[in-house]
Image (cartoon, rainbow, N blue to C red):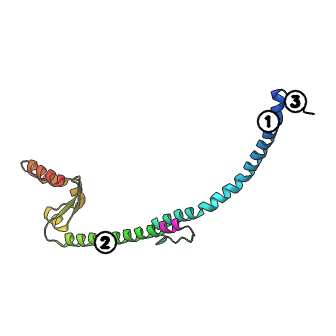
Amino acid sequence: PGWVVGVFLPEGQVRQPILDYVRRQGWVAAVVVLSMLPLLWWLLRLGLSPLRRLARQIALVGQGEIPRITLDTSLDELRRIARTFNDVEHERGLERAERHRRQAYLDAVLRSSPLPMFLASLDGRITYVNPALESLTGLSTPAFQRREWLRRLHPEDRPVLFALWRDAVNG
C-alpha cells in the first residue's frame, strides 16, 4: 500500500492528443469564422448606412437638388454633423447672395459711370472695360484683353506706364 506508480511515455505520445484536439478546434474555428463573415459584413453595412445616406445628401446639396440635409438617425454625432453642415451651408448661401448683390452693384456703377474705367486681375490682365472707356478708345473688352491698347501708346510713355502698372499690381 504506499506505492507510487508512474507511467513514462515518449513526448510525441503525450502531445499527440493535444495536437489532434487543437487541429480539430482550428477547423471548427475556421468554419465558424467563415460562416460569420457574411453576417459581419451585413452588420457593418447596416451600421454604416447612416453615413452613406449622409454622404448622398451632402452630394445632393452640393448639386443644388436639395436645400439641406435631413437625417433620421439615432446617432447623436451624425445629427450634429448634419446640423453643422446645414448651418455652414446656410451661411455660405448668405455669403453667396451678398457677393452677388455686391457684384451687381459694382457692375451697375461701372456700367453707368461717365468716367473711363477698367478692372484687372492680380496678374495684370484686363478683365473688364466699361462702356465709357470703350467709347473713348474705340476698343472693345476683348481687344483690351488681347492687349491691342499697347499699340496705341507712344513709345516714350511705355516705360513709365509699365512701371506704374507693376507698382499697382504689386501693391
Magenta-drawn stretch contains 136: no
Position of 40 relative to 107 (above/below): above
CA–CA distance in space, label 2 to label 3:
94 Å
Where does the C terminus fall, quadrant-wise? bottom left
Instruction: Give the side of residue 137 with respect to residue 17, left or right.
Output: left
Tag 3: residue type?
Answer: Val
For label 2, the SS is helix
Instruction: Residue lying at the far right in this picture: please name it.
Output: 1
Q: Nearer the viewer, residue 85 or 155?
A: 85
CA–CA distance in space, label 3 to label 1:
20 Å
Task: Specify which label sits upstream in the sequence, 1 or 2.
Answer: 1
Q: Are marks 1 and 2 in contact (CB under 8 Å)?
A: no
Position of 7 relative to 95 (above/below): above
The residue at which mark 2 appears reads as 98
Task: Specify which label sits upstream in the sequence, 2 or 3.
Answer: 3
The image quarter containing residue 114 is bottom left
The residue at which mark 1 appears reads as 19
Nearer to us: label 3 or label 1: 3
Nearer to us: label 2 or label 3: 3
Nearer to us: label 1 or label 2: 1
Q: From which residue to which does the magenta span run?
A: 75-80
